[in-house]
Amino acid sequence: MKFGTDIWVLYPKLSLEDTLRTLEELGLKYVEYPYELFKGAESIEARIAEVVSTAESFDLIPYQLHAEYGDICFELSSLDEGVRSSAFKRLCRWIEYASKLGVRVLVVHAAFPRPSLDTRYDEVIKRVIELNVSYVKKLAKLAEDYGMVVAVENCVEPWFCSSPPDLLLLMEAA
């Protein structure tokens, strides 16, 4: 059997090179690159080139890239179409980044709204499911063009998609 892990288990405590060396020495075959590897980089493109150059020295397969998360999850569910569109375009760039890294799977989090007392919970959930299904389908179509797939990962509580039932709602709606 071949196993893999997110490099975040060791990085940034160890350098990228030392992290990859350690994972290879442990007999792992696949790695996931975390968003944190690129977060805050002056140039994501330059960081990608650095990661690719470093990874070439190892017999590891970069299998997954975790896309941006955090504020973008709120932005993807914004009531403002311009905010949603801008967030989606940013997320689409992660498909390109993943392709440059030789990654097959882009991991994303679901969109979820900020708490509001103005809308009933059932209405919020209905809307957020529709938005998620729409954005994930569009993102998946783009990923196909690059020979990749998109995986929706659970997020931390208390947000939408923090639980298996929430993820099932998305799958059933798709």
Image (cartoon, rainbow, N blue to C red):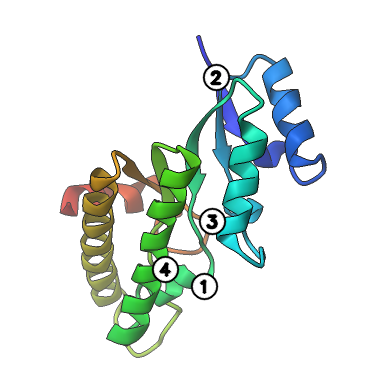
Q: Look at the picture and state if 14 lies above or below 20.
A: below
Residue in the image at 36% along x and 61% along y:
92
What secondary structure is found at the residue carrying circle 1? Answer: helix
Give the labeled residue for mark 1.
Answer: 71
Q: Is residue 112 visible?
A: no
Q: Between disc 4 and disc 2, whose residue precedes?
A: 2
Of the residues tagged 3 and 4, which is closer to the observer? 4
- What's the amino acid at mark 3? Val
Q: Pointer 3 and pointer 4: residues touching (CB < 8 Å)?
A: no
- What's the amino acid at mark 2? Phe
How far apart are labels 4 and 2 at the CA level? 31 Å
Q: Between disc 3 and disc 1, whose residue precedes?
A: 1
Of the residues tagged 2 and 3, which is closer to the observer? 2
- What's the amino acid at mark 4? Arg
What secondary structure is found at the residue carrying circle 4? Answer: helix
Residue 3 marker = 2
